[in-house]
């Protein structure tokens, strides 16, 4: 089975993409620029971008970009999708140029989430230099971070990722907001790198197209300064500072200009999958992470 290497990028949509430039510079501590076509590229490492923001009529999440090792793997994935009866579309040269990759295909999972699979990212010599002094973001072979997607057709979507794409289950959490109703499943999945999870599937709707994405920084000082910048810039907080039980990430959550949330944290587990045992977490966090400050309220625009 062809391996998915990492979550390489995410694609967002925004009615005013330029707002992502200010958000990236002033809050995330990332680099960002607007292209002539109105697309904004948010840069956090040596790649030209890890978040790509397209202009559109809604503020929302559009797609997840998954990286393959090369042309052979890309062709192998097409065979896998064909065998599984998954409909996909090969991107034309213009779309590949927009994404700055050598080959790209698009497909949707059984819950309707859009995914892009590619090989051959185009790299330039532009180094990352944070405008806010962030030492670095934790990316490299582990990719951007992670994304949490709504999966109302949960079982079929889980099978798509595990049986068709070869993701593994890192752990599960059965969310029980009301003890009188069935638990809502959340599964955390890994691909071919050590990050505890690159994807989580949540069995509840998210009108923004994504529950949250995660960016990781290397120490608590960077998290604390990011928290200060969130407050100084009047950004809506979605969850207070805390530490997760499953991946040990110490983080807080805030809203993005595309309305979905962004987790900003450090200390995420890097796993040896030969030794890892999948488990069920019975609590979201070891401490903190009060989600009532944002996720349980109406989300206002940034």
Image: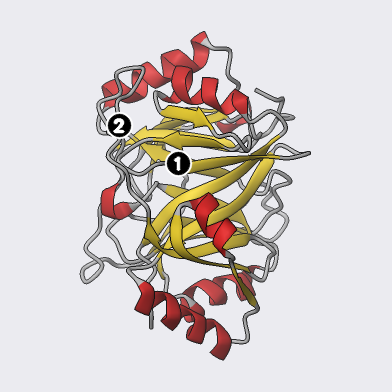
Question: x, y percentage for residue 217?
Answer: 31, 33
Instruction: Answer with left or right where residue 189 lies relative to residue 248.
Output: right
Name the quarter where the C terminus is drawn: top right
At 54% from the left and 50% from the top, the residue drawn is 98
Furthest-top residue in this view: 232
Label 2, residues with CA under 10 Å away: few <14, some 14-19, many ≥20? some
Q: Which residue is mark 2?
A: 128
Instruction: Answer with left or right where residue 192 lies relative to residue 101.
Output: left
Of 54 and 226, the residue lying toward us: 54
Q: Is residue 207 above or below residue 173?
A: above
Name the quarter where the N terminus is drawn: bottom left
Of 12 and 158, the residue lying toward us: 12
Question: x, y percentage for residue 170?
Answer: 38, 63
Q: Which residue is mark 1?
A: 214
Furthest-bottom residue in this view: 83
Q: Is residue 154 above or below residue 121?
A: below
Q: Is residue 287 visible?
A: no
Question: x, y percentage for residue 39?
Answer: 59, 38
Dividing the picture into quadrants, the one containing residue 235 is top right
Of 13 and 60, the residue lying toward us: 13
Of 129 and 189, the residue lying toward us: 129
Q: Nearer the viewer, mark 1 or mark 2?
A: 2
Question: In 3D space, how far apart are the residues under numbered discs 1 and 2 (Cα atoms)?
Answer: 19 Å
> What secondary structure is found at the residue carrying circle 2?
loop
First in sequence: mark 1 vs mark 2: 2
For the image shown, how many numbered marks are present on the structure? 2
At 36% from the left and 79% from the top, the residue drawn is 72
At 49% from the left and 84% from the top, the residue drawn is 80
Dividing the picture into quadrants, the one containing residue 171 is bottom left
Furthest-right residue in this view: 57
> What secondary structure is found at the residue carrying circle 1?
strand
């Amino acid at each position: 089975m062809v391996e998915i290497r990492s979550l390489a990028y995410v694609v967002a949509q925004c009615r005013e993409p330029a707002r992502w430039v200010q958000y990236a510079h002033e809050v995330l501590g990332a680099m960002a620029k607007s292209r002539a076509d109105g697309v904004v590229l948010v840069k956090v490492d040596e790649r030209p971008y890890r978040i790509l923001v397209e202009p559109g009529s809604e503020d929302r999440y559009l797609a997840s970009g998954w990286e393959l090792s090369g042309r052979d793997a890309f062709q192998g994935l097409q065979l896998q999708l064909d065998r599984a009866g998954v409909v996909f579309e090969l991107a034309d040269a213009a779309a590949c140029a927009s994404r700055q990759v050598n080959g790209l295909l698009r497909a949707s999972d059984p819950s309707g989430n859009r995914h892009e699979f590619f090989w051959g990212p185009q790299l330039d010599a532009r180094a990352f230099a944070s405008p806010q002094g962030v030492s670095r973001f934790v990316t490299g072979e582990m990719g951007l971070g992670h994304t949490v997607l709504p999966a109302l057709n949960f079982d079929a979507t889980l099978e798509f990722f595990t049986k068709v794409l070869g993701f593994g289950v890192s752990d599960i959490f059965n969310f029980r907001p009301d003890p009188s109703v069935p638990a809502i499943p959340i599964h955390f999945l890994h691909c071919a790198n050590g990050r505890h999870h690159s994807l989580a599937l949540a069995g509840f709707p998210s009108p923004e197209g994504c529950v949250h994405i995660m960016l990781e920084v290397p120490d608590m000082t960077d998290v604390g300064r990011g928290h200060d910048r969130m407050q100084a810039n009047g950004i809506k907080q979605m969850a207070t500072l805390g530490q997760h039980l499953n991946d040990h990430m110490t983080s807080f959550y805030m809203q993005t200009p595309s309305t979905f949330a962004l987790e900003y944290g450090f200390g995420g587990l890097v796993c040896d999958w030969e030794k890892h045992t999948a488990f069920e977490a019975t609590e979201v966090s070891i401490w903190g992470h009060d989600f009532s400050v944002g996720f349980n309220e109406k989300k206002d625009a940034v």
